[in-house]
């Protein structure tokens, strides 16, 4: 796993490099609400990733991140049943004063992909408009 990205420009460069290296047909990104902490550093990073994917020769499927579980840790455990190869990376539930484990980003990405897999026709058709 690589170190976290600090700036939107760095995130966009990294996304461009990943698309060039892996040459995917589809990239799934998070659809951000315009009202959602638009000045927040994380939102700026997400917008940079989404923008880079939209500019690339890939199908950018942008989906809403819906919280359907009690917390991210419950969601991670359930996603590991859908994607057994993720099981070794399921983080233990953190204490309120602990930082979120860096590997949690794997499960956020898996949740977005799982959203597309549950309704692929709708998600892909919406991305092709």
Image (cartoon, rainbow, N blue to C red):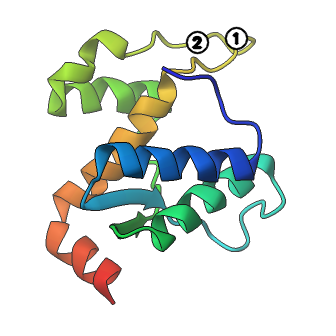
Closest to the observer, 55 or 37: 55
Q: Percent from the top left, x then y, of residue 33?
A: 62, 70
Closest to the observer, 90 or 97: 90
Marks 1 & 2, CB-CB < 8 Å contact = yes
Q: Secondary structure at mark 1?
A: loop
Taking the view exactly as shown, the residue that stands out farthest to the right is 39
Q: Percent from the top left, x then y, of residue 32?
A: 59, 65
Q: Quadrant of residue 94?
A: top right
Q: Percent from the top left, x then y, of residue 119?
A: 18, 66
Instruction: Tell me, for residue 94, which label it has, or none.
Output: 2
Closest to the observer, 58 or 35: 58
Asked whether residue 24 is in view, the answer is yes
Q: Quadrant location of the C terminus?
A: bottom left
121 sits left or right of 65 in the view = left
Few, some or many C-alpha atoms within 10 Å of disc 1 (few <14, some 14-19, many ≥20)? few
Few, some or many C-alpha atoms within 10 Å of disc 2 (few <14, some 14-19, many ≥20)? few
Distance from Cα at disc 1 to Cα at disc 2: 6 Å
Asked whether residue 68 is in view, the answer is no
Q: Quadrant of residue 21?
A: top left
In percent of the image, x 19 and y 56: which residue is there?
117
What number of labels is visible? Answer: 2
Q: Secondary structure at mark 2?
A: loop
Q: Which residue is mark 1?
A: 98
Q: Is residue 64 above or below residue 70?
A: below
Instruction: Tell me, for residue 34, which label it has, or none.
Output: none
In percent of the image, x 48 and y 20: which residue is there?
1
Q: Is residue 99 above or below residue 81?
A: above
């Amino acid at each position: 796993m690589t170190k976290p990205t600090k700036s939107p420009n760095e995130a966009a460069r990294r996304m461009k490099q990943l698309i060039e290296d892996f040459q995917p047909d589809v990239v799934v990104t998070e659809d951000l609400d315009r009202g959602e902490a638009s000045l927040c550093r994380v939102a700026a990073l997400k917008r940079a990733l989404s923008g880079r994917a939209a500019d690339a020769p890939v199908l950018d499927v942008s989906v809403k991140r819906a919280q359907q579980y009690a917390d991210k840790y419950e969601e991670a455990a359930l996603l590991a049943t859908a994607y057994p190869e993720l099981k070794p990376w399921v983080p233990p539930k953190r204490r309120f004063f602990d930082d979120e484990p860096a590997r949690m980003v794997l499960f956020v990405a898996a949740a977005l992909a799982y959203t597309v897999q549950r309704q692929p026709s709708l998600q892909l058709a919406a991305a092709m408009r």
